[in-house]
Image (cartoon, grey):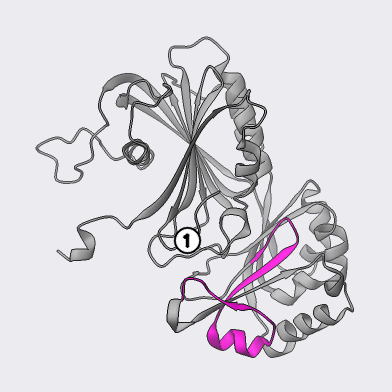
Amino acid sequence: MSVDLDHTPRCLLVSDRSSFLHEKNRINSQVEQLNFNYKVSLLLPECGSTPSHLDSMLNNFSTFYLIRKLPIYELLDKRFLETAVYQGCVYGLSYRTRIDEDICVALMPNGHLCLSLDKDSFQVLGVEGKASRFSHRTKSRYVVSVDMTESSMVPGGRGYLRLLTGLKSRLPLKSDFLLSHHPGGGASLQALLSRYDWSEHKPEVSTHALTCLSCPTQLTSIPPNFDPHSFLEWLGAVDADISCENSSCSFLSSLACPEPKTMLSQALRVSVCGLLLPQDILRLIQEIRCYLDQPQLQSWVALTVHGFVDSPVSWGGREHGALRGGENFYTLLMGEDHTYHLHLVTGAHDTCPP
């Protein structure tokens, strides 16, 4: 076996413990700082079917659009800027591009356009940028970040024309592109959608019932009686449908549920996949809090949000690196007394979560 396979890559983990009732809790700001999310997973203990109000919330996540072979210079279209970028929050991401070797593009809700380029493409584009902080001495990748709301980027401005010329003439990039808008939705994007081949998509919801699930005890205790790494490993195994029984006859997994543990008679695993907006995730968190206010056998719910592995930006719009795994996710463990444990994780080649 390769030496590199003997251990998992190092990751960065930041943990926080607080209460939703605390006026200085940072849940809203932390959720909003991860802009590009592709999956939300819920684990509901002692639950056999999705509660109606949660099911309604999960099936009402914002729709998103896939535009095929979109010329990137179209993101600078004057009408698109006026009806979408300047009017709310646009979430745009190049689709099926790989951050370690392809050109990746993101349009962030604050109006910043970010391009992650290889060295040759960067030199051809001819726009100011900086070397990727993850390319080390080789300087093989560069990042161009432009604030489309700045005065120099107003259509007809000097900076605007320079970028438009670069993307239209010198480096005519095209990519399949995911796009969503809050709060206007598809109506705000019609200026762009009307000119290209596009399709509308609803986030996909799936559920899976679990029985006889080993689970760490006292998950929401203060102080916590579990190691965050072990807890996240266990939760990831549950989400991936990997046994944590660590049976002597099993050659597939040596994972074990953290001690002390208990046995849940049943649990429900729910996931939503697509281009998921932070605003919808915040609404889901509020619905889960309402769910926890009701009398029930268990007193916690775990929510995990996964960012796109190949997004050029991660926490707070900072550069995202993917030389190893490209992880950027967070897990929110919520208790019935309004307390929570928040674990924010990125790969080793990434900026530290907030």
Q: Position of residue 124 (x, y in %)?
A: 63, 90
Q: Is residue 117 magenta?
A: yes
Q: Residues within 10 Å of mark 1 (few under 14, many from 20)?
A: many
Against 191, is 168 above or below? below
Query: Of residues 267 and 303, which is closer to you in this image?
Result: 303
Residue 264, magenta (yes or no): no
Picture quarter containing residue 51? top right
Q: How many marks?
A: 1
State the extent of the magenta-drawn residues as a range: 106-135
Q: Which residue sits furthest top?
A: 295
Q: Position of residue 314 (x, y in %)?
A: 56, 57
- The quadrant holding residue 265 is top left
The residue under label 1 is 350
In the rendered image, the quadrant that contains the N terminus is bottom left
In the image, what residue occupies the spot 64% across and 78% down? 129
- Residue at 77% in and 49% down: 185
Is 112 above or below relative to 14?
A: below
Residue 235 position within the rendered picture, expressed as x and y whole percent measured from the top left: 37, 37
On screen, residue 216 versus residue 40, left or right, reads: left
Residue 7 lies left or right of residue 210; in this view the side is left
Camera-nearest residue between 255 and 349: 349
Instruction: Answer with left or right where residue 75 lies relative to residue 135.
Output: right
